[in-house]
Image (cartoon, rainbow, N blue to C red):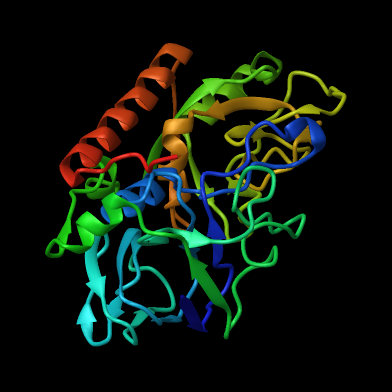
Amino acid sequence: MIHILRAGRINSVQDSGRRGFRHLGICRSGALDRIAMAIANLLVGNSRNAAVIEFTLGPCEIEFTADCRIALAGANFAATLDSTALLPWWSVNVRAGQILRLSAAARHGMRSYLAVSGGVDAAVQLDSLATDLQAGFGGHHGRALNDGDRLAVGQLTPSNIAIQGTNSFGVRPPYWYQHGDVDGITVRVIPGPEYSQFSEEAQQKFWNHRWLLTSQSNRMGFRLNGEALTLKQPCELLSHGVVPGVIQVPANGQPIVLMADAQTTGGYPKIGVVIEADISKLAQLRFNRTIKFVECDIAQAREALRQDDVYLRQIEMATGWLPAAK
């Protein structure tokens, strides 16, 4: 059992999200940084997609009421277990009664993921445990965590038990975590369906300028600020399906990158789509830092996903992870 002593804000139970329900108006939800979530899970012997706690804002205090294995991955919230520092990308055994503390805001990055051996447990809704904060279902009562909440933990697998029998260990994070730009990040984008409807000047601005991530951003969409992008001529689009990663440009010319909790339809022109492999990088960008977009194609996007999978498979092999028996 996990006892939330101090919940912080906008922190919730997430897994890899809901797929296959967008035709019903159900958004994907799930962890914004799928790579950090997967690594945290593998470090405790869970499957990549087991439910975790996604932290965005602290301070947070969590008591573990039973012995378990935990790992943090993603942003560095200067975490401590009792009085001992707990680094991100690190896995440790925890005794019943120990308390994990996270600071008010991350020192590096934006979101951290806490995995517990067995995974956070909750009722499965539409094939997922992820919290849909907009619709108010999934996760822990369909909402962000509150002080006093108690979360159940799933049954241990042989992989969980094997890792609990080892000493503390960690992994080296993805390259871009270690070598991020001081001012911001570079994100790969495939030109969108309405790209050609933007003026040549707007297209050049989109690729050549750095865009500021504003504090109006949330799990639905990341709002950017820069020189306004203009269309060749005004156009009105019928609402159509959209997915996380789509970059919409509303009438004010300031791009919005749709994220995991985004709506399922939209009517703004789509200038591009952030490739799935780079959404984790985007999820860790702090407010008032910048993004530069770099053009890529579908083949490059698929190769980037393949490289992510190779990296995670290496961690699975190193930790001795085995699929749970069905």
Residue 326 showing in the rendered view: yes
From the viewer's side, name the closer residue of 149 and 297: 149
* Residue 203 image position (x, y, % from top left): 58, 22
User: In the figure, residue 228 lies in which quadrant?
Assistant: top right
Residue 183 showing in the rendered view: no
* Residue 116 image position (x, y, % from top left): 38, 63
Which residue is at a point 54% across and 67% down the rendered structure image? 11
User: In the figure, residue 24 lies in which quadrant?
Assistant: top right
Which residue is at a point 23% across and 45% down the rendered structure image? 179
- As displayed, is residue 49 above or below residue 146? above
- As displayed, is residue 70 above or below residue 319? below
| Residue at the extreme left | 167
Q: Name the quarter where the C terminus is drawn.
A: top left
From the viewer's side, name the closer residue of 199 and 42: 42
Which residue is at a point 36% across and 81% down the rendered structure image? 101
- As displayed, is residue 110 above or below residue 178? below
From the viewer's side, name the closer residue of 46 and 194: 46
Which residue is at a point 45% across and 48% down the rendered structure image? 33
* Residue 213 image position (x, y, % from top left): 53, 51
User: In the figure, residue 289 lies in which quadrant?
Assistant: bottom left
* Residue 277 image position (x, y, % from top left): 42, 32
Q: How many numbered marks, from 0 up?
A: 0
Give left or right: position of 287 versus 169. Answer: right
| Residue at the extreme front | 326
From the viewer's side, name the closer residue of 239 and 127: 127
